[in-house]
Image: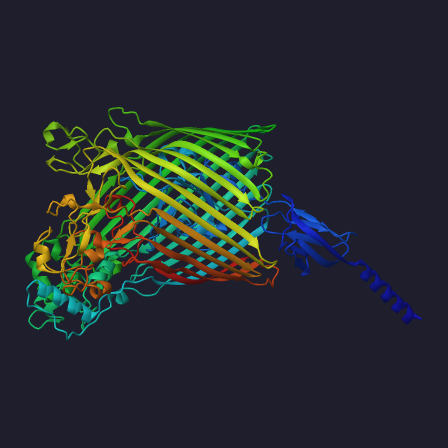
């Protein structure tokens, strides 16, 4: 009986369960337009039971009554419904406009992206960390339109950041960096893993709130904070190996001998190299090796109703390509927020510390590796560094010789004898007190600053370097010279120098914010003032001779008293700034937007005894119009959002390379005067390369017109901007037309520089199946640089000097700023008759380059030099691809630039003098009449000409990363991801040198200097690394 009852119960419950199981179907459409959506994921929550909609948006699925169905699709908000008795469930998905509601930092406040009226680009932490880097700016290359990042690859070096072109010749391109509301001089000391977002203000209408500091753009860094819920612990680590990317192939020993002998023969010399040599040194192989890097990071974060906290530690180590070149950086960050008095008072504290230790090595070693002969050994048998000694009688290069092949040093010795160690400590902190006065009014007081300590020690082994260079002498010979010259520092055993400096800057911001919505009207007003100080620097320098050779005794106190010691102290005049600012934002029904900014800046840099006005006003105005909220566009099926923006603003650049108040003007009796200005007036000037009074900040005015859009259910999004950016009074470092006395250069406002162009951003994201999704991104920027006007006295200023004294650049109206200016190569002289019957420069022989007689006057001179564009790229672009399949993820990023020319100075200045040449210079040289009409013969040219200008176009794959998220097997671990990354694995370029990414920012490397000229560049590198991310 019991058995029968049991069977009946089993049958009953089975039938009940079967009765609850049901098949449902339906159609998934877009709420905006009602179009069917293919590929929508339809799944039973908490199970693996699920399907995807077909091409017509239809689905069918067997479920149990009471289960929950989740409908998800990229570009739409996720919907979850409970299954009741219905067999048909049709769903309309609403567009996900989360990106429009994204919060953007705009200075003294935030704003929804949909409300922006200016040109602001942003990147989030997840996208930054896809490409591991020591400096966060390296990771944004190719991801933001209008932002050109030029990487330098050397450990600890900062990339050059150029936003919307170059408008200055004397100052740099560095933008204003704001970290958690505090102005800082750079972000190389910030751990990239600590960054939550980076927002870049590109136009004047947005950046005018920062006045005379914002002409180069503004980059906001927002560091991470805790999130509500239980405490989160994150661990990350990666290890990598770095080597040279696209090394230059050099001539080998036999090729060098052939080339060298051709040069000597053409000069009429009988001293030739023998083909029987002992060495064939590959200097790049000797100089560089695979170098290692690693990063280890831990962070703890969390939040509740009253407290928000984030704490992190990071250790970063990187070896450079050169032996013993390395950088170690340790960082700490603590961010805390406290909500007090029922959330009416909020106190935010931020603190970070970074200690960096490095052993920098001279980049000139790469120059020497390029130029030194392969016949020179890296080391002699006795362990000494090889030198370019050769015996002109036997033609053999070796330890003994009666002459030198060249004057180039041994690059290994250059690195070995550079015993420099640097240490930098950077501290940054801020306190922000926010008080809610009413529901619409709040007050903020933020005080923050940075403090930096720098110290450097350099040991120079004079005796060892002397004996290395003079292989015929020994230590006894050196000691005899030292005894004969007891006070001559050239014969000291060594010298030791110490440099120390400390600097600080601070800002104190106090401002009110009024935010009110009245019906369809939204008003936001900010008003405040800032007091700050920067460039507060104190430094010391000590130099002494003959300290003990062992490093443990390298101390000034142990130095010999036989030589005069140097001890110097200096301090800079601080730059003090006082600013008043305000912003008004208004929008009607989130359809029409207006914004106005005003800032009045006063800065002590331009103050002097004559009480010159040193306050400036920087206004801006902008407006936005959401066209898709108008009836004539609201019904367009696949257009979700379209907004037009227009803005105008005025900015300043006070980052000039001098301080007017620190220089005194020479009197009439000092015999220091210059001819300057449009009228060529003779005036008395300053004797220290100082500015000519009066001088002020540079002024930039910009107009921007833009569009933002989202389409196809927000899967497609993007923006377009056109800008016209005019620097009215660019400061020039002027070489005097006439000098007497010291004859130094001076500064003056001398040019008007225009940058105009457009920017495009596109992003697409979609699901292919439930398990497979992807995203595509593309950015493109086009910029044209032009000198609109130059003071007549300064028109024609030259620059871009090469190591052989040749100049390559000229400042002239109608051309890019300091455009390439040189002879145009017009083939190769094939025979003497050609030379005799045509205009030529100097006394060429067959095989020399010929130059075009531009004005056909029969003479080759400066009047025949021609402009060849700029070293600044006219366009740059980037694209990125992301792919996710189940637990796998793939990211590929690329960047490219072009439209510019690079001067291959290595190739151009190593034609003669016994230096080595690149293989292509050897292989393609002129060897006799008719052999080539493009490339000169051996040792046949050393003048600056278009022959050495090469296209700077390139495409580099920045990043290829593949990752896998492991199944979670422990409750204590929420996520484990392992990944492998190839960083800069490929570069495609026709440029024959080390790299077309030639750094040029300011000073000697600026527009009028070596920017765009490769003389001693650090090679591009590639890195392969493996890493892991763990969240607890």
**Residue 663 rendering spot, x and y as whole percentages:** 21, 33
Q: Is residue 222 left or right of residue 578?
A: right
Looking at this view, is 530 or 148 the one in front?
148
Count of numbered labels shown in the rendering = 0
Task: Kindly indicate the quadrant of the structure image that contains residue 662.
Answer: top left
Image point (15%, 36%), residue name? 736
Colour scheme of the rendered structure: rainbow
**Residue 672 rendering spot, x and y as whole percentages:** 12, 33
Q: Is 28 above or below relative to 642?
A: below
Which residue lies most toward the right here? 1
Looking at this view, is 557 or 755 the one in front?
755
**Residue 141 rendering spot, x and y as whole percentages:** 40, 50
Q: Is 972 above or below relative to 877?
A: below
Q: State whether residue 992 appears in this view.
A: yes
Q: State whether residue 132 appears in this view.
A: no
Identify the image quadrant of the N terminus.
bottom right
**Residue 237 rendering spot, x and y as whole percentages:** 46, 59
Q: Is residue 599 left or right of residue 349?
A: left
Task: Kindly indicate the quadrant of the structure image that contains residue 39.
Answer: bottom right
Identify the image quadrant of the C terminus.
bottom right
Looking at this view, is 930 or 8 the one in front?
930
Q: Is residue 933 left or right of residue 1028?
A: left
């Amino acid at each position: 009986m019991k058995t029968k009852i049991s069977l009946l119960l089993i049958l009953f419950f089975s039938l009940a369960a079967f009765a609850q199981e049901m098949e449902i179907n339906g159609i998934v459409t877009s709420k905006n337009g009602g179009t069917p959506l293919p590929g929508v994921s339809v799944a039973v929550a908490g199970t693996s039971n699920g399907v995807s909609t077909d091409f017509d948006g239809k689905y069918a699925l067997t479920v149990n009554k009471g289960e929950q169905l989740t409908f998800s699709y990229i570009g739409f908000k996720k919907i979850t419904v409970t299954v009741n008795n219905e067999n048909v469930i049709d769903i309309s998905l609403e567009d996900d406009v989360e990106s429009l509601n994204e919060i953007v930092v705009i200075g003294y406040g935030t704003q929804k992206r949909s409300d922006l009226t200016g040109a602001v680009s942003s990147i989030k932490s997840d996208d930054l960390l896809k490409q591991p880097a020591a400096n966060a700016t390296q990771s944004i290359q190719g991801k933001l339109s209008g932002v050109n990042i030029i990487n330098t690859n050397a450990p600890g070096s900062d990339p050059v950041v150029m936003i919307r072109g170059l408008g200055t010749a004397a100052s740099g391109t560095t933008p204003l960096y704001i970290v958690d509301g505090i102005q800082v001089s750079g972000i190389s000391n910030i751990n990239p893993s600590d960054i939550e977002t980076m927002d870049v203000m590109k136009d004047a209408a947005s950046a005018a709130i920062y006045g005379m500091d914002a002409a180069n753009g503004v980059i906001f860094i927002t560091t991470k904070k805790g999130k509500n819920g239980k405490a989160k612990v994150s661990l990350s680590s990666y290890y990598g190996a770095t080597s040279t990317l696209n090394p230059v192939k050099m001539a080998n020993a036999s090729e060098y001998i052939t080339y060298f002998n051709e040069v000597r023969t053409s000069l009429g010399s009988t001293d030739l190299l023998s083909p029987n040599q002992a060495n064939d040194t590959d200097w790049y192989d000797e100089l560089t090796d695979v170098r290692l890097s690693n990063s280890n990071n831990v962070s703890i974060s969390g939040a509740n109703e009253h407290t928000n906290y984030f704490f992190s530690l990071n250790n970063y180590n990187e070896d450079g390509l050169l032996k013993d070149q390395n950088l170690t950086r340790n960082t700490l960050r603590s961010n805390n927020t406290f909500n007090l008095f029922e959330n009416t008072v909020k106190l935010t504290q931020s603190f970070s510390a970074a200690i960096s230790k490095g052993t920098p090595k001279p980049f000139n070693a790469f120059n020497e590796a390029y130029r030194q002969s392969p016949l020179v050994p890296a080391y002699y048998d006795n362990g000494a560094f090889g030198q370019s000694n050769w015996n002109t009688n036997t033609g053999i290069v070796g330890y003994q010789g009666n002459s030198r092949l060249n004057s180039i040093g041994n690059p290994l010795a250059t690195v070995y004898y550079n015993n420099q160690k640097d240490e930098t400590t950077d501290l940054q902190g801020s306190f922000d007190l926010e008080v809610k006065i009413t529901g619409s009014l709040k007050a903020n007081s933020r005080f923050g600053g940075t403090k930096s300590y720098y110290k450097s020690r350099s040991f120079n082994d004079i005796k060892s370097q002397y004996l290395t260079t003079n292989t015929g002498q020994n230590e006894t010979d050196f000691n005899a010279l030292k005894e004969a010259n007891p006070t001559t520092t050239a014969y000291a055993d060594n010298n030791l120098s110490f440099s120390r400096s400390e600097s600080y800057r601070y800002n104190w911001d106090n401002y009110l914010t009024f935010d009110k919505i009245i019906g369809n009207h939204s008003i936001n007003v900010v008003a405040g003032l800032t007091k700050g100080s920067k460039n507060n620097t104190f430094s010391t320098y000590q130099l002494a001779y003959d300290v003990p050779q062992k490093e443990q005794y390298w101390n000034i106190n142990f130095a010999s008293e036989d030589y005069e010691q140097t001890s110097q102290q200096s301090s800079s005049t601080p730059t003090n700034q006082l600013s008043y600012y305000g912003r008004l934002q208004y929008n009607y029904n989130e359809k029409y937007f207006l914004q106005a900014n005003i800032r009045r800046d006063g800065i002590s840099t331009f103050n002097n005894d004559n009480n010159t006005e040193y306050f400036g006003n920087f206004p801006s105005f902008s407006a936005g119009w959401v066209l898709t909220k108008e009836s004539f566009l609201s019904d367009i099926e696949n257009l979700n959002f379209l907004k037009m923006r227009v803005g105008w603003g005025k900015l300043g650049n006070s980052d000039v390379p001098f301080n007017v108040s620190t220089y005194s003007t020479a009197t009439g009796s000092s015999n220091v005067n210059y001819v300057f200005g449009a009228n060529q007036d003779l005036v008395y000037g300053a004797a220290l390369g100082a500015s000519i009074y009066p001088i002020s900040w540079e002024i930039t005015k910009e107009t921007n017109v833009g569009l933002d859009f989202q389409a196809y259910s927000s899967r497609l999004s993007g923006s377009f901007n056109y800008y016209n950016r005019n620097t009215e009074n660019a400061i020039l470092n002027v070489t005097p037309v006439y000098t007497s006395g010291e004859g130094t250069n001076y500064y003056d406002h001398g040019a008007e520089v225009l940058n105009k162009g457009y920017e495009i951003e596109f992003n697409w994201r979609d699901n292919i199946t439930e398990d497979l999704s992807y995203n595509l991104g593309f950015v493109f920027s086009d910029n044209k640089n032009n000198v609109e006007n130059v003071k007549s006295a300064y028109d024609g200023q030259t620059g871009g000097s090469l190591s052989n004294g040749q100049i390559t650049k000229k400042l002239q109206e109608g051309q890019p700023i300091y455009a390439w200016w040189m002879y145009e190569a017009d083939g190769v002289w094939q025979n003497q008759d050609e030379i005799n019957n045509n205009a030529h420069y100097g006394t060429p022989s067959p095989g020399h380059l010929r130059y075009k007689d531009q004005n056909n006057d029969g003479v080759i001179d400066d009047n025949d030099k021609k402009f060849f564009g700029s070293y600044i790229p006219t366009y740059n672009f980037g694209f990125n691809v992301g792919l996710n399949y189940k637990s796998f993820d793939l990211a590929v990023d690329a960047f490219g630039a072009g439209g510019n020319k690079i001067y291959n100075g290595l190739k151009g200045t190593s034609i003669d003098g016994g230096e080595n040449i690149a293989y292509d210079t050897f292989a393609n040289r002129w060897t006799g009449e008719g052999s080539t009409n493009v490339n000169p013969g051996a040792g046949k040219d050393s003048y600056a000409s278009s022959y050495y200008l090469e296209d700077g176009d390139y495409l580099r794959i920045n990043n290829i990363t593949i990752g896998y998220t492991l199944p979670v097997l422990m409750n204590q671990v929420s996520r484990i991801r392992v990944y492998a990354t190839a960083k800069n694995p490929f570069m495609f370029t026709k440029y024959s040198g080390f790299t077309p990414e030639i750094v040029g920012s300011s000073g000697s490397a600026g527009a009028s200097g070596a920017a765009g000229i490769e003389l001693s560049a650090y090679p591009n590198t590639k890195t392969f690394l493996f890493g892991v991310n763990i969240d607890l």
